[in-house]
Amino acid sequence: MSAPKITELGTQSIRSLLMKYALPGIIAMTASSLYNMVDSIFIGHGVGAMALSGLTVAKPFMDICAAFGTLVGVGASSLVAIKLGEKDYRSANDVLANVVLLNVLLGALVMAVGLYWLDPILYAFGASDVTIAYAREYMEIILWGNILTHIYYGLNSMLRSIGHPKIAMYATILAVVVNIILDPIFIFVLDMGVRGAALATMISQLVSVIIELIVFLNPKEVIYFHRGIWRLKRNITMRALGIGTAPFLMHMASCFVVIVLNNQLKRYGGDMAIATFGMTNRFMFFFAMIIMGLNQGMQPIVGYNYGAKLFDRMVRALKLTAMCATCVMGVLWLFGLVWPEGFIRLFTHDEVLIAQSIAPARVMLCTMVMVGFPMVVGNFYTSIGMSGKAIFLSLTRQVLLLIPCILCLPLLFQQLNITPIWGVWWSLPICDAMAAVLATIVLNRDMRIFRQ
């Protein structure tokens, strides 16, 4: 996209801009969420319930790997949007190069550490002697491709920030299509089990990275790969990492919560309870990715208008995104209330697991209508460089509220002669409701400042 066309972010109607930028993001993120869902569906039906539990144990480890990619990708894409709003195209080009270099360095570091301590990490994350083999087989291949994963997500974020949300969408959809084609071949035809699912994921990401590289090698783009930009710059690196710290800490806190949750589930409900959480969480993740797509559409609009000091447009973009997010999560809430068995059967044909999962799924989804708003508010603060407030909102929910609930509610339920596992299930919706209230309080105070 040429530099002048970027100015549409400060002139066109917010509704049309959000539709233009968010719709590709929603499609891309929804398609991206199908990675995990497709792997889980094929593994659940092709390998079994214990393999599904092993994949659930591996997920927080995968999320930690992704968190380091988010540290670079989200921070850099937000910084690029701000720089483009300031008309500083040279610095925006330098940010692009730093995205690749930082992703290679961090990706290699995470891969080395993960492979060296793989088994102890998986046991700490809730694996049992039954599920450890499945989790290990999956994560070994994912870790070997970790650098590729970081570059894939980093360049995808940059595409959206320079005005190519559709290309970012096409790259993601292509990866999902390749993954869906390869999964049954590797799992059923070649009998590779969970290793086949992991290998299909890495090959699909490689295909998308090739598409992204082609775009950024084009000198007609507003930012592109060329000589003179391939060195780390301290000011860009530190600012990008500073902005990306908020989503990074959010991801890390979320991973830590899942680790604590998995161990509590294993303690009070065993491997089947972990499988129940894994299925419900992946279905929730599908809707959460729609919110992430909305947030991705909001990010360049909010970042540009903040950089251009068009605060009224920035606030309007936030409000519209928050309303859309609430509607999306309302659909998930209704689904969980009326027919949770429907999505559970997507993942397994084990009747015992299905019967045990319906009631906990209803509990976990009972406050979903409130979840979209705090997600949007946190991303809003990240998009305008106010990482501290995004970190505060996320860590308060994850660390100060949710973890104590996960640890204490089972003990309280036990004292009340209620099965302790229900304390684990109820901790999730209770904290979601409290997080929504907290986000409302923080945002209302800042909105008065922006209106002035």
Image (cartoon, rainbow, N blue to C red):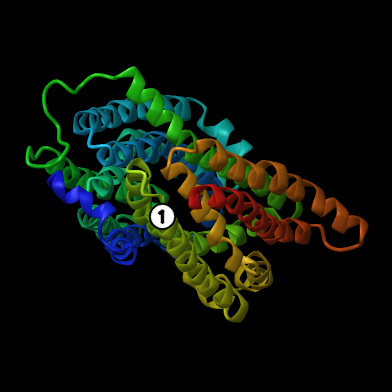
**Horizontal and vertical percent position of residue 255:** 56, 42
**Horizontal and vertical percent position of residue 232:** 29, 19
* 152 lies above or below 98: below
- The mark tally for this picture is 1
**Amino acid at dot 1:** Asp
* 182 lies above or below 305: below
Report if residue 326 is visible in the image.
Answer: yes
- Residue under the image location 68 percent in, 72 percent down: 359
Between residue 278 and residue 98, name the one nearer to us.
98
**Horizontal and vertical percent position of residue 101:** 28, 26
Callout 1: few (<14), some (14-19), or many (20+) C-alpha neighbours within 10 Å? Answer: few
Report if residue 286 is visible in the image.
Answer: no
Between residue 206 and residue 131, name the one nearer to us.
206
Residue extending farthest front? 452
Left or right of 166 on screen, residue 109: right
Between residue 274 and residue 163, name the one nearer to us.
163
**Horizontal and vertical percent position of residue 50:** 56, 55
Question: Which secondary structure lies at badge 1?
Answer: helix
Label 1 sits on residue? 312
Left or right of 234 on screen, residue 67: right
Q: Residue 206, located in which quarter of the rendered image?
A: top left
- Residue under the image location 49 percent in, 71 percent down: 327
Left or right of 409 on screen, residue 447: left
Q: Residue 437, located in which quarter of the rendered image?
A: bottom right
